[in-house]
Image (cartoon, rainbow, N blue to C red):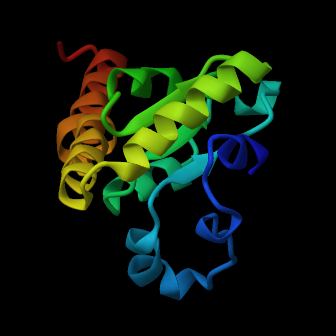
Amino acid sequence: RAAFEAQGLPKEDIVTRSVAPDSMPRTLPLGDIGVSFIRPCFSKTGSSPTKVAEYLSAGMPAVLNGDIGDQAELASEASACVVLSSFDDAALGSAAERALALAKAPFEARKVAARAAAENHFSLAKIGVPRYEALYRALTREN
């Protein structure tokens, strides 16, 4: 919050709230940008936060730390994601500037870029099925 305020974003423009799970599909697309900061630890090494895929699938850009699971791969999606490599003041300031730029982009452009990032990284048809099929073939030696 402080980083956004330091960049001139008024407090009234920063909204955080809890939403019931059944309201998420209607509520998520109303946001300008999703934030997912997770404390790095051993148990998170192989995880991928579901909320990042949800943000992007809903057409909302995301700000996240890249040291959780495969999140660093999203750095290639600069028009939809801001990936932090550290939480020092310089990195946070830079991330806040990039996040504000994404949030200020035209709505349709943000939506298209975010949904494309979701498709590129989380699609069951493009990513999930081919990778599982390759794994199963390798395990059963059907290559």
Q: Nearer the viewer, residue 21 or 43?
A: 21
User: Residue at image x 35%, y 40%?
Assistant: 80
Q: Is residue 107 visible?
A: yes
Residue 76 image offset from top left, x and y in percent: 34, 21
Residue 95 image offset from top left, x and y in percent: 58, 30
User: Residue at image x 66%, y 46%?
Assistant: 4
Residue 112 sits above or below residue 122 on the image: below
Q: Nearer the viewer, residue 96 or 119?
A: 96
Quarter in which the C terminus is drawn: top left
Residue 106 image offset from top left, x and y in percent: 24, 54
User: Residue at image x 31%, y 45%?
Assistant: 118
Residue 137 sits above or below residue 7 on the image: above
81 on left or right of 57: right
Q: Is residue 70 visible?
A: no
56 on left or right of 63: left
Quadrant of the rendered image containing residue 37: top right
Residue 54 sits above or below residue 67 on the image: below
Residue 40 image offset from top left, x and y in percent: 78, 28
Q: Nearer the viewer, residue 5 or 122?
A: 5
Residue 137 sits above or below residue 108 on the image: above
Quadrant of the rendered image containing residue 25: bottom left
51 on left or right of 130: right
140 on left or right of 103: left
